[in-house]
């Protein structure tokens, strides 16, 4: 697993170098945005202005209108059947409902940022298909530049995943490298940045991001934005306390694979991992409200928790990651022992958190649950996943977007972190 991982990091690094000029453009754009009101050099990304899907369930054509020619790389994935198109960072100015309903072989599609400098389109297919052609046309005869992907249906037996083995798409190269550079199973030899700051590390993980919106309120607010706002406020609150160092898995609208979120917790030898989400219940299933705190377990505490874990675990598929390449769980007695201890710590923190949160926020009628969330699987980092409330519930949504609710609730989470880690100073903690 670790050699595969190094290989991955090398690839990431190679691609990073290749993309250096692109990255330079991106970072100067960010610098311009955050520091200088009068940009010396205006940096703009290509703009996608419209999209069309034509054809039937034998042949389907996808067309994206652009204001300039770009590079594109398309491949198909199975289980579930998807087409992924990797392109440089693009500003999407598409109709808000674009992608929610497709046509022919494309059931639906998504688009968004997957790493600094890189955007991605993901089509959900109705069945097995191959890419007949994919190309980008120059603007001509009054038509804008266009990205075209032509799909043809194939038999199930003839289906082949076309993701190039030697050139895997690398999401967030910086983070993958940082995570893999840290000693995976080591104890004291943390790198200098870590040993320079002896404070315990809290990893805050805002769910979803980029082309994965998470759940969506009927009025349009998306989970990825609600939880990012919450996570940033929580970071600020904890940092203000001065006792802990905070690492965010993302602090912008970028997609991070579930496995990388876990790696970030492990690479930073985190004392605690808190994943932030907001749930939704489909109308036909009635109404639910309040916050719920989840811990990891092989057996879900109830059917509802199991369904939620399944939905949250789909994030990687949504962003077009080939799930068959995920490393299998390692069977190791030491890992097993550590994991048991870690689960005890996780559930202790969950209880403390529920008690703190209920003083300021409305809780679900059963606020403590467990299920097989992939993002909670660091075997040596106590981890919880907080569903702040239901965006499908009117009163919950009002809270979720309210500044004062956020401030109160963030305060209660920070309080719980304090109580949990304060008590743990003397305890052995999970061995590493
Ligand atoms: Zn979520």
Image (tube, rainbow, N blue to C red):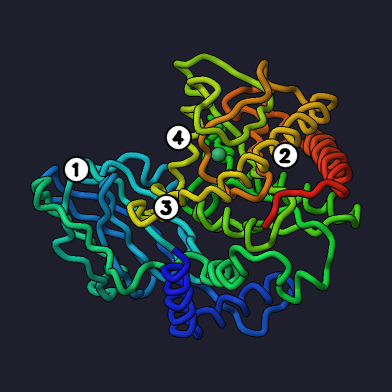
Label 3 belongs to which residue? Answer: 319
Confirm if mark 3 falls within 8 A of ligand 1: no
Closer to viewer: mark 1 or mark 2: 2
Pointers 3 and 1 in contact (C-beta within 8 Å): no
Q: Is tag 2's residue or tag 4's residue first in the polypeptide sequence?
A: 4
Q: In which quarter of the image is residue 189?
A: bottom right
Q: Distance between the residues labelled 1 and 4?
A: 21 Å
For this rendering, which residue is in front, 222 or 160? 160
Q: Is tag 1's residue or tag 4's residue first in the polypeptide sequence?
A: 1
- Residue that appears at 19% across and 55% down: 61
Which numbered circle lies on residue 127? 1
Q: Distance between the residues labelled 2 and 4?
A: 24 Å
Q: How far apart are marks 4 and 3 (CA)?
A: 15 Å
Q: Is tag 3's residue or tag 2's residue first in the polypeptide sequence?
A: 3
Q: Distance between the residues labelled 3 and 2?
A: 31 Å
Closer to viewer: mark 3 or mark 2: 2
């Amino acid at each position: 697993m670790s050699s595969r991982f190094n290989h991955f990091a090398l690839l990431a690094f190679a691609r990073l170098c290749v993309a250096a000029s692109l990255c330079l453009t991106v970072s100067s754009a960010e610098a311009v945005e955050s520091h200088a009101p009068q940009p010396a050099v205006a940096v703009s990304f290509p703009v996608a202005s419209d999209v069309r899907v034509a054809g039937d369930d034998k042949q389907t054509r996808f067309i994206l209108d652009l204001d300039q020619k770009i590079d594109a790389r398309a491949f198909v994935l199975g289980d579930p059947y998807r087409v992924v198109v990797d392109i440089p960072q693009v500003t999407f100015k598409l109709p808000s409902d674009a992608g929610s309903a497709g046509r022919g072989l494309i059931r639906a599609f998504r688009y968004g940022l997957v790493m600094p400098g890189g955007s991605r389109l993901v089509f959900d297919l109705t069945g097995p298909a191959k890419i007949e052609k994919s190309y980008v046309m120059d603007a001509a005869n009054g038509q804008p530049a266009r990205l075209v992907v032509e799909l043809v249906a194939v038999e199930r037996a003839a289906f082949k995943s076309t993701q190039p083995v030697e050139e895997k798409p690398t999401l967030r190269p910086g983070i993958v490298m940082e995570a893999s550079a840290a000693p995976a199973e080591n104890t004291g030899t943390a790198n200098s940045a870590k040993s320079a700051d002896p404070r315990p590390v809290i990893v805050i993980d805002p769910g979803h991001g980029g082309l994965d919106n998470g759940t969506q309120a009927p009025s349009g607010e998306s989970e990825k934005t609600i939880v990012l706002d919450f996570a940033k406020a929580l970071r600020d609150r904890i940092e203000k306390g001065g006792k802990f160092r905070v690492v965010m898995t993302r602090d912008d609208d970028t997609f991070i694979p579930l496995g990388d979120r876990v790696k970030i917790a492990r690479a930073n030898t985190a004392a605690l991992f808190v994943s932030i989400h907001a749930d939704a219940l489909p109308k036909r299933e009635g109404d639910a409200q309040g916050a719920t705190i989840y811990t990891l377990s092989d057996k879900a505490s109830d059917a509802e928790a199991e369904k939620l874990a399944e939905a949250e675990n789909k994030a990687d598929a949504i962003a077009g990651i080939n799930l068959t390449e995920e490393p299998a769980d390692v069977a190791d007695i030491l890992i097993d022992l550590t994991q048991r201890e870690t689960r005890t710590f996780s559930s202790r923190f969950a209880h403390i958190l529920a008690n703190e949160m209920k003083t300021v926020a409305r809780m679900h009628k059963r606020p403590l649950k467990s299920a097989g969330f992939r993002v909670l699987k660091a075997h040596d980092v106590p981890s919880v996943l907080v569903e702040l409330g239901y965006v499908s519930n009117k009163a919950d949504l009002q809270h979720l977007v309210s500044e004062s609710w956020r401030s109160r609730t963030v305060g209660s989470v920070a309080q719980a972190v304090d109580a949990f880690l304060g008590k743990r100073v003397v305890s052995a903690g999970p061995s590493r």
